Image (cartoon, rainbow, N blue to C red):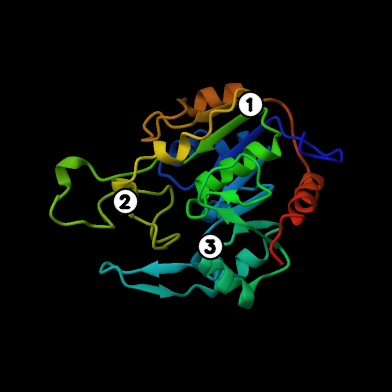
């Protein structure tokens, strides 16, 4: 046991990313099905789902969202989003270099910044793997919070890429505007990750997710079409069947805050 004092250890954790596959879950009543469950929202999904806390690794996200135009020019804007984020009950971020710089100016009381690292370790005392991919960092933290025993459902982990037939091998393109990468529209939530396929096109997800093979943890990828093949893929209907009857209240959030505070960057 990593925990010296008694605290709630979740048996199931639901991680909600931003992939387009979440649209299917929403059409099947996902919000009601996971109400009062141990949910961790990643990045912009906090706008649509209740959660114990929200995770991010991107300084640009934390400081008000960065939006893009069709020529890949980026502009910081959206003060309304900035204010909304600061009203969330608990945010957990990591210390990428850009975050550290931003933290000096904008850290709010609802936020805990954790050390991060670029090499995997199941313990988080020396840093949370991985510092540049929030979906990976959330898996690392989830395993730790459940003391390496239980079930994790990953939603919206699509690893979306452009189809090979439409790729130009002589012209690397970061954004493909004909590819639907997220479950929300550009008009609702516009940011530089929309239609961004470049990173996923040139990286093998196995290099990041191969570390998550704990004997007492079962990870379900809730998308039959995800390009991440490290975990068993299931439908939303199957996920709903597998959900237990446990519910969690705000006291769990306080426990999480207390636990993570000892790793916090001051």
The answer to whether residue 120 is left or right of residue 254 is: left
Work out whether 187 lies above or below 138. below
* Distance CA(mark 3)–CA(mark 1): 34 Å
* Distance CA(mark 3)–CA(mark 2): 21 Å
* Residue at figure coordinates x 47%, y 37% from the top left: 209
Instruction: Specify which label sits upstream in the sequence, 1 or 2.
Output: 2
From the image, tell me which residue sits under label 1: 243
At mark 3, the secondary structure is loop
Task: Give the image location of residue 96, x and y in percent.
Answer: 53, 62
How many numbered discs, if any?
A: 3
Task: Give the image location of residue 235, x and y in percent.
Answer: 46, 26
Name the one closer to the observer, 142 or 185: 142
* Residue at figure coordinates x 33%, y 55% from the top left: 196
From the image, tell me which residue sits under label 3: 96
* Distance CA(mark 1)–CA(mark 2): 32 Å
Task: Give the image location of residue 237, x and y in percent.
Answer: 51, 25
From the image, tell me which residue sits under label 2: 197
Q: Residue furthest right?
A: 5
At mark 2, the secondary structure is loop
Instruction: Specify which label sits upstream in the sequence, 3 or 1.
Output: 3
At mark 1, the secondary structure is loop
Whether residue 35 is visible here, answered yes or no, is no
Instruction: Specify which label sits upstream in the sequence, 3 or 2.
Output: 3
Name the one closer to the observer, 219 or 96: 96
């Amino acid at each position: 046991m990593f925990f010296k004092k008694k605290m709630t250890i979740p048996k199931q954790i639901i991680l909600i990313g931003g992939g387009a596959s979440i649209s299917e879950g929403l059409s099947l009543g996902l919000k009601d099905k996971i109400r009062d469950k141990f949910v961790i929202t990643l990045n912009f999904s906090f706008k649509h789902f209740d959660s114990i806390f929200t995770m991010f690794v991107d300084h640009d996200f934390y400081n008000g969202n960065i939006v893009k135009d069709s020529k890949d020019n980026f502009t910081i804007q959206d003060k309304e989003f900035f204010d909304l984020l600061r009203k969330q009950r608990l945010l957990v971020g990591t210390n990428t270099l850009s975050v550290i710089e931003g933290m000096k100016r904008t850290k709010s009381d609802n936020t805990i910044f954790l050390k991060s690292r670029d090499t995997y370790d199941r313990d988080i005392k020396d840093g949370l793997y991985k510092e540049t991919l929030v979906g990976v960092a959330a898996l690392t933290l989830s395993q730790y919070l459940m003391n390496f025993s239980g079930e994790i459902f990953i939603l919206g982990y699509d690893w979306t890429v452009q189809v090979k037939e439409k790729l130009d091998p002589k012209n690397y393109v970061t954004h493909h505007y004909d590819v639907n990468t997220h479950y929300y529209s550009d008009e609702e939530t516009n940011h530089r990750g929309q239609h961004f396929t470049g990173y996923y096109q040139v990286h093998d997800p196995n290099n990041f997710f191969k570390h998550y093979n704990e004997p007492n943890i079962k990870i379900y990828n809730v998308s039959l079409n995800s390009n991440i093949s490290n975990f068993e893929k299931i439908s939303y209907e199957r996920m709903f069947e597998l959900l237990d009857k446990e519910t969690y209240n705000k006291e769990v959030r306080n426990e999480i805050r207390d636990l993570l505070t000892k790793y916090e960057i001051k």
